[in-house]
Image (cartoon, grey):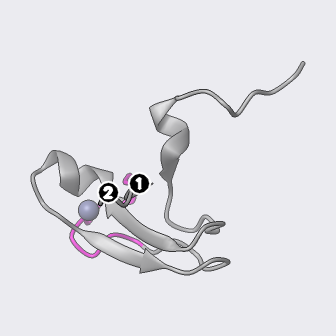
Amino acid sequence: MPVQFRGRDTASDLFKPGERCHLAGSYLCETCRLADRNTVVQVEDGAIFPLCPDCTDMDMGWRRREMSG
Ligand SMILES: [Zn+2]
């Protein structure tokens, strides 16, 4: 069955530590964001997403921070 990746599924926008980055940029820790912390890492194209330095939990995800303005 066909797989669609075009949807606005929020979970698919999250990148887990250990996943490979396909688009260099600033990524915001979603877990930190929910906790009112602003933890951002710079990830290069082809690099592996790190663990969040502020989260002791592996169960976190990075979300690409959109540049506005
Ligand atoms: Zn975090």
Whether ligand 1 has any atom under 8 Å from the Cβ at mark 1 is answered as no
Locate residue 40, reporting x and y percent: 29, 70
Tell me the residue that label 2 is attached to: 68
Residue in the picture at 45% in, 34% down: 10
Whether ligand 1 has any atom under 8 Å from the Cβ at mark 2 is answered as no
Q: Residue furthest top?
A: 1
Question: Which amino acid type corresponds to the residue marked 1 in the rendered image?
Answer: Gly
Closer to us: 40 or 17:
40
Q: Is residue 52 above or below residue 29?
A: below
Residue in the picture at 87% in, 22% down: 2
Tell me the residue that label 1 is attached to: 61
Residue in the picture at 26% in, 51% down: 31
Locate residue 16, reporting x and y percent: 50, 57
Who comes first in sequence, dot 1 or dot 2?
1
Between disc 1 and disc 2, the foreground one is: 2
Question: Which amino acid type corresponds to the residue marked 2 in the rendered image?
Answer: Ser
Q: Secondary structure at mark 1?
A: loop
Residue 55: which quarter of the image? Answer: bottom left
Q: Is residue 43 above or below residue 28?
A: below
Tell me the quadrant of the picture where the C terminus can be found.
bottom left
Locate residue 8, reporting x and y percent: 53, 29
Tell me the quadrant of the picture where the N terminus can be found.
top right
Bounds of the magenta segment: 51-60
